[in-house]
Amino acid sequence: MKDSKQRSSQRQKHASALISKGRRKVNTLFSKIKTKLSHSMPWLNNWFKHQDKDQNRTFVDQFSAKPLTFKLNVFLEALKSLILYGISIGLIMFALGLGIGAGYFAALMKDEPVPSYQVLKQQLDNTDQAAGLYFAKNTKFGAIKTDLSRTPVSINEMSPYLTDAIVATEDEDFYKHQGVVPKALLRAVISDLTGFGSQTGGSTLTQQLIKMQVLTSQVTFKRKATEVLLALRVDKYFTKKEILQDYLNIATLGRNNKGQNVAGVQEAAQGLFGKDAKNLSLAEAAYIAGLPQSPSVYTPYDQDGTLKDPEYLKYGLDRKNTVLFRMYRDDRITKAEYKAAKKVDLTSEFQAKAEPESTSKRYGYVYNLLESQATDIMTKQLANEANVSTEKLNSSPTLYKQYETKATELLSTKGYQIHSTIDKDIYDSMQEIVKQEGSSFGPTYQDATTDPITGLQSVGDTPVQNGSVLLDNQTGKVISFVGGRDFSLKQTNYMLTKRSPGSTIKPLLVYGPAIDQKLIGSKTMLADFKTNFKTYAPTDYGNTIQNKFIPADKALAQSLNIPTVNLYNKLRKTTNPATYMDKMGIHLSDDEYSQLGLALGGTKDGISVLAQASAFTTFADEGQHVDAYVIDKITDPAGNIIYKHHTKKTQVFSKATSYIMNQMLSGVLTDTDGTATQLSDQLYFNTNNLVGKTGTNNDNRDVWFIGSTPGITLASWMGYDSTGRNLTDSSSTINQNYWAKLANSVYQNDPSIMKLEEDHEKPSTVTSSKVVKATGQLPGIVSINGNTRTVDSGKVTSLYNNWTPEATQYEFGIGGTSSNYETFWNHYMGYNNGYGTITYGETKASQSESE
């Protein structure tokens, strides 16, 4: 008993100690609060000074003495206040968030056009989902081929089981909502923001239809907001029956027994079960209704139309049972129907493998060109929308393939329209000409080829091929082209293949930059003597050497090699020619620029006809270059522009340089010794403003002619596929004759695009000087063999890019040795020393040009 009292006394002392300790803590806390308040609000100091410490202590003692129930009530009241404050703050934050969200939604949608009923109907009903292909002037000629088969049918021709199954599986509230389900939408937004929760996306059947027919599958808030807006509008404009019909005709549903991708329930019914959609059984309808969630997983067929192995086939069969359960759960079928359909073994009902029908492409060269160009455009556009730079995209094949796959899907499923720049009438005329003239290009050989896949050899025809292109000089648009002799025999587009450009590179790489850099004028003399550049000894056509100085314009008109190499050798020490070529869209390596043979077309991989023609247009457009393009725009079925080409001009040469180059290039056709002097006689139109350049490389392996009027540039290349086959010696003439026929057909179809009457206006920066014909410089006094001689006889006009030449010097030209100049001056003084006598080189030059 005594021990009990002692323990009770000890507990009381312990409790008193705890209370005292608590009082001290409260007093300490109160003091700290008072100090902080005093510092922040000085006016409280007076109030605190008048407070009796005993009063404070009394308040604490009184509160401590209160019963536990009182203290609990105080605590609960405080907690209640905190909860109410929390709820109030939560409601305020929710309202604020809702307002911000609504404002953000409005901001996203403020520039979004509101589609009309007709526009939406056209988009939703459009089952021609592969991109349409168009010539210029909105002339359609076909569509991108896909292995996606689709046959739309009325909803009345679909089994009721199908409509019930798809609604029960994909959107159980389809007949109740107005296009969107706010609860599901909110859940999807929270899931997207947090990364937690269901990944279903909250999409109704209406929203899925919008995504498939109107929008892309790109995940952005703006696209989602647009989807919601359009879904509400679709639900307002169309009946549930119409929406469901469109969905069931559009949805992708895996592969059929031919290995083709199928869309729409009619194709799925035929491809899987060999029957129409209206005749599907409950089990069959449930199987098809389960496919949209993951067509590639649930489809019963592999890519070649073979039935999948049982271990993979079971995924689709299990999905069928899930659909049946949802139909039963929603009272769309009875329990007996549910059990009976579950027992059905669909494996035996799937169609046996079959071969797809073969199809041919109309306008094959145009088709392939537009398909590849459109895919590349959409690939880069999708990457750009995802903030992936073109440089990064091009540097990563894996990344490019990722976006290319998405681009291909868009072009196969969105019903886009690809509008090209190709003029159908001109294109048809050019194809007819190559068909008629092809047999005159040269002999056709029988060559053995090896299949790169099977390794088997076969013998086939190797004819002379042709690649040609017609460009608009001011815009860069491809008006027409010739891809090859016969698409059915060879699908290679020779407008795009790279070949040695031969002498067509001379005005672009050498003469144009030399004029622009004020290195030469049109009559500047260039040396044409036997020359050795270490291991490189160029010669002119036929292994000849002229053994004289030749004016620059004559050297270009006659396409002489040695003067061109001498000029390029000098030019490289003055500037980097790559800066000019890059601006014109021709990109070569540093190693190629270091080789003197490049001046004659000696590239490593070659240059395409399209790229070479595009660069050539620069002279016709006052020194400005525009990239060639073939796709003008891509639109959706409603006419909205998805992509539009915008021409960007780059100043490459001065206006004066371009004017002078046009004057020099006209000599190719007008000079007595020009390499295309016979061409004008074959043309139906005024050739006063026609300029051009020929090109031929070693052993006539490649021949070119590029000609320009003020409006257009037309380029033609000929050659064999096989590097072991060469053209005949008359191939350059044959190519010019063929070029003339192409040009005449252009003139007959649309003479206005050639702008034949537009003269090249002479810029004020072009300087004309009367120079001595023999030296290409102004009259001057020269010391010859110790004798002073005034050189001023025989004057010609030379054109310069805003500069004036100096008086005649002893060494007046570009290139040549002291011995060459001595020979010249002795000849000038009247000695007969063989100056100007043509000789032959010891060996044939590695890049000897015929023209």
Image (spheres, rainbow, N blue to C red):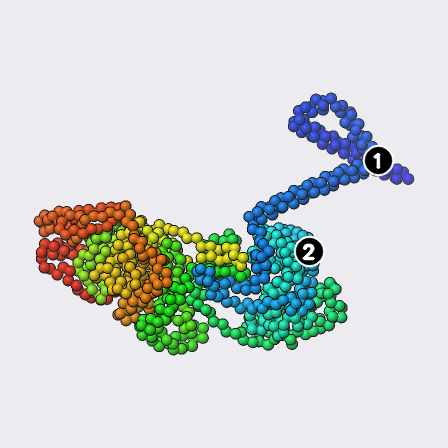
| Residue positioned most to the right | 1
Q: Residue 337 placed where, x, y %?
A: 74, 70
Disc nearest the viewer among 2 and 1: 2
- Find residue 320 and name its label: none
Q: Is residue 687 visible?
A: yes
Q: Nearer the viewer, residue 758 or 277?
A: 758
Q: Is residue 254 left or right of residue 729?
A: right
Residue at x 79%, y 29% (from the top left corner): 59
- State which quadrant residue 349 falls in: bottom right
Residue behind mark 1:
67
Q: Nearer the viewer, residue 215 or 83?
A: 215
3D distance between C-alphas at marks 2 and 1:
58 Å
In which quadrant will I find the N terminus? Answer: top right
Residue behind mark 2:
177
Q: Is residue 483 visible?
A: no
Query: Dot 2 surroundings within 10 Å: few (below 14), some, or many (20 or more)?
Result: some
Residue at x 45%, y 69% (from the top left corner): 362
Q: Secondary structure at mark 2?
A: loop
Instruction: First in sequence, mark 2 or 1: give its number.
Output: 1
Q: Residue 514 placed where, x, y %?
A: 27, 52
Q: Is residue 794 left or right of residue 718?
A: left
Residue at x 63%, y 52% (from the top left corner): 189
Q: Residue 291 placed where, x, y %?
A: 63, 66
Q: Nearer the viewer, residue 92 or 377?
A: 377
Amino acid under disc 1? Pro
Q: Is residue 776 left or right of residue 124?
A: left
